Image (tube, rainbow, N blue to C red):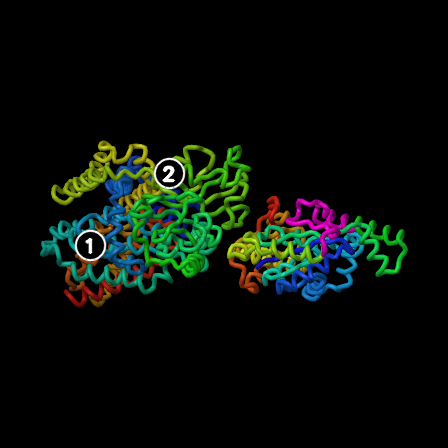
Amino acid sequence: MAIITISRGSYSKGREVAEKVAQRMGYQVVSRDVLLEASEKFHIPEVKLVRAIHDAPSILERFTHGKYCYLAFIRAALSERAVKDDLVYHGLAGHLLLKGVPHVLKVRIIADLEARVAAEMKRENLTQNQACSLLIKDDAERRKWTQSLYGVDPWDASLYDLVIHINQLTVDDAVDFIVQAAGRECFKTTVEAQQKMQDLALACRVKASLAEDDCVDIAVTSEFGNVLVYTKQDARKLHRMEDKLKLLTKKVPEINHLEVRSGQAFPPEAC
Amino acid sequence: MPTLTAEMILVMIMIGVAVFLFIVEWVRVDVVAILMMVTLPLLHLVTPKEAFSGLSSNAVVSIIAVIIIGAGLDKTGVVNRLVGPILKVAGKSQSRIVIFISLTVAGISSFMQNIGAAALFLPAVQRISKNLKIPIGKLLMPIGFSAILGGTVTLVGSSPLILLNDLMVPFKLKPFGLFDVTPVGLALVAAGIACFVFFGRFILPGGGKSDESSPAAEERQEENQIIDELGRPWELTTPEDFTHYREPVTVDALRRRYLINVVGMVEPPDFKVLGPAPDQEIRSGVDLVVYGQEKDVRRMASEEGMELKEDLELFKGELADHASGTVEAVVAPRSNLAGKTLNQVDLAERFQITPLAVYRQGVVYRAELGDLPLRVGDAILLHGTWKRLELLHAEGSLLFTTPLDADQLRPEKAMFAGIWLAVALIMVIVFKIQLSVCLMTGALGMILTRVLSIDEAYQAVDWRTVFLLGGLIPLGIATEKTGTAAWIAHTVLNAIGTVEPIVLLAVIGLLATVFTLVISNVGATVLLVPLVVNMALAAHTDPRLAALVVGLATSNSFILPTHQVNALYMGPGRYRSVDFMKAGTVVSIIFLVVMIAMLYLFY
């Protein structure tokens, strides 16, 4: 069994593909519900997150540590879902949020601009020019988003296992490909892969809990429940965070051991 | 009846000053002793020659020699071999170790000089303390006191008793037999040990609040904390199906998963690997030795289905303290290790040394050590054989903060060490040559046969002990020479007048106890025996009993670190004068009560 992330632009039929894949494989579909979950769990108004994801990333900066907290919360929520396995996620940057997990099939669905314009015109009742400029603006916005949050270009094909262009190929073709790919040996949820997923979820959870308490600018890794919290703060000024971590260690049974590393470069795999 | 002179008053003032300084500890006790050594001749209370005669006295030279002999025995591993059986019999409980060693020391010291017995056991006690992580302060004092008490078991156990018969000759009293004092002596030893077993935790340093703040105690606590962090070595066996249906498990995988360090393993059939490389594969049915916290080790054992052994079995020898150990090493400034990770340095591959933990700014790092870029000032806890650690030390990139103490063990010289000890003991027991000469012969023999170098011998000598004893001897000389002691004795005994025999004996015992704290026990005996015999005759009490009280009570020297044994143990045991006063007062009172009671019952 696997985790499938589908990255898509607007009106690229990504949602349709995702839903069909999930249906065919009997998986759960997740997209914006993750946001709802995050907002419930961490007591932030959903509006804040929704607006954040729709408007330019600059809006996040209006809140203190907005970008940082947004990422921490959404990642914690998504990884918690992903631990349960058998999941299709569609939306922006799912593949980046679940970085480092081996059994994630990363798919991008793209479509011709003409087809997308036509779809938008139909749904929103717009002229061709209006729809076209809106789509181009939307694409640019999403690109900016991904670049600002994750530092990569969503149009870079090397980020994905599969890039499917819906034009000649139909939605059903895409679903076939994805289902076939998801069945490959390399996307099987092995014990090791599941362990990695659990560790990622744990690290994200620790990070989000700390973000909730305004402990920001940290990175967290976990390996077999041995959690390392990296911070750039001086080791001597960490009392508040340490108190919080002590509480967390008691509360979360998955944490086997917890260490704080200060003044050390954040490892690339840290969340 | 002598009259009180100005000199006597001056001597009493000096004694008062010395005792006062012992108590307040404005300067260390050995400095107080040196102060006496210098002030007394300046005040013309002793001649300059007498002032320094203490340094060449039989006692001091004996101590120097016996410390060297002890160091030789320790360096050759003889002490380790001695400690093994002791621990086997005594187990790991502190009380049982104290009882067992105390009885042994008391037994030995009943036939030889107390200080000899005490000094010979010092290295052994230090080893036991280190091996079993018992604070040395909890062990040394009971053992030292037992050595002193053991001197009362036979008539040749301590100098005052040896002298006793000679001192009674002028009075034509019947001399004592060798074992006449044995019942009293045994009762005293038993009472002393019982006192420490039952009240040890109240009277010994290390448990009270006042001690917590002392640097020594802090150091002890810190050591314990480190040990808690690291856990201890455990031996496990992997199950037969360990490698079935899974990726190979490596040493590094176990360390990442359970935060334990594999320091040794047995490859079938019986090839032992110490400090295995991180990528070393662990197969089915092999024995492992790991360092780790109990909860981590137990978790690993249950999750991996390993069998956790009660104690070290196969690796007992390799992980014994004389073969391998754990040291703390600091990344030196300008060291080529700074900036590298432990994976890059690869101590396991190059030196077969296992890094256990890293300390940085008061924080202990145990997880993912391999990827941690080292910084100047990081302390790394390393485990390996002393030989391998020595090689790493020689490389110079790490500064070792814990000395590689077992590095110069010379087991091949053990026979020579044993022979020279035997020579010294035979000279003492059979040929009755003066103790200092015998022991120095043994020490010299060890140096000539290269059991230890002359420099090591010099380093082994504890100058604190030497000057503490050497400086107090002139104080004793002054007290006797000016007639102060005699005056005090006369005054006290006259003051009490004619009383019940038991009261007289108690007063004599008390007087002897006070005297032996300040002047030497021999001096006190020589001075007091003629006096008390006369007193006893006048009071119609048994004069032999009075003399015996003096002979025994001059061993009742526990309140101040002025007795040779106490002086010797004060440094290594990290005791302060207050510690002796606290425990010593209790033991001294018990001593007097038991002695009088036993004498009253048996004679």
Check disc 2 and report its element: helix, strand or loop. Answer: helix
> What kind of residue is marked 2?
Arg
User: Which callout, 1 or 2, points to the residue nearer the camera?
Assistant: 2
- The reply, left or right, for residue A258 in relation to residue B314 is right
What's the chain of the residue with tag 1?
B
Viewer can see residue B9: no
Instruction: Name the one closer to the observer, B320 or B114.
Output: B320
Give residue A172's position: percent from left, percent from top: 69, 58
Kind of residue at badge 1: Gly
Left or right? Give the position of A70 relative to A123.
left
Q: Is residue B169 visible?
A: yes
For image coordinates 51% across by 33% down, the residue present is B336
Position of residue B562 relative to residue A17, above or below, is above
Q: Quadrant of the C terminus of chain B?
A: bottom left
State whether residue B512 is above or below residue B81.
below
Q: Position of residue B504 (x, y in %)?
A: 23, 63
Q: Which mark is residue B107?
A: 1
In the image, residue A142 lies in the stretch drawn in magenta = yes
- Toward the viewer: B23 or B342? B342
